[in-house]
Image (spheres, helix red, strand yellow):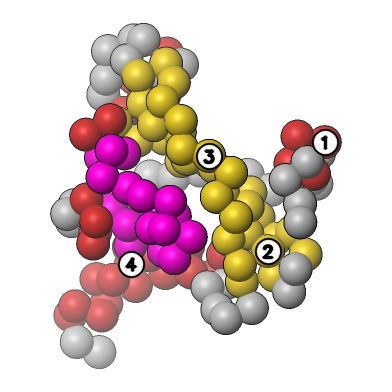
Amino acid sequence: MPPNQLRKEKQSGINRHIFLISENITVKVIGKELEKAPAVLAEFLGLDKGTRVYKFRRLRYLNNGPLSFTVNYMPISFGEKILRKHLREMIMMETLETVVGLEPGIVEHEVEINRANAMIRQFWI
């Protein structure tokens, strides 16, 4: 396998498996909002407490049934470059690489799996 492919798999492989990127998947962009980062998030992103960040929310559907609800937070300098079309067409790692121009090394992210609740249910098709 060429080194470039191996690098890409290490960076986005787990996301591809979780989100099953395929023609059977549709993405509904719920929002792109600026909000004050909670203290824990600001610390994680290396920002000052109270700094505003972009919050992206997406709902993915598999064959018209809800599959996943994704929330991402980004510093303003990254988030302002990301359009709704990017959120519909790419996973966040691809967006960071191709739109923002980052070449992430080791990436830390958290995946939480729960049953859909009323907050998420309101966005279903």
Q: Residues within 10 Å of mark 1 (few under 14, many from 20)?
A: few
Q: Residue 48, located in which quarter of the rendered image?
A: top left
* Residue under pointer 4: 10
Distance CA(mark 4)–CA(mark 1): 34 Å
Task: Name the N-terminal-most of marks 2 and 3.
Answer: 3
CB under 8 Å between callouts 4 and 3? no
Q: Residue at x 57, y 81 (%)?
A: 23
Amino acid type at circle 3 is: Gly
Amino acid type at circle 4 is: Lys
In screen coordinates, is 50 left or right of 116? Answer: left
Amino acid type at circle 1 is: Ala
Distance CA(mark 1)–CA(mark 2): 17 Å
Q: Position of residue 113 (x, y in %)?
A: 69, 48
Q: Residue 13, located in which quarter of the rendered image?
A: bottom left
Q: Identify the mark at residue 31; answer none if there is no mark.
A: 3
Distance CA(mark 2)–CA(mark 4): 25 Å
The segment highlighted magenta reads 78-96
Q: Residue at x 64, y 78 (%)?
A: 24
Q: Residue 53, located in which quarter of the rendered image?
A: top left
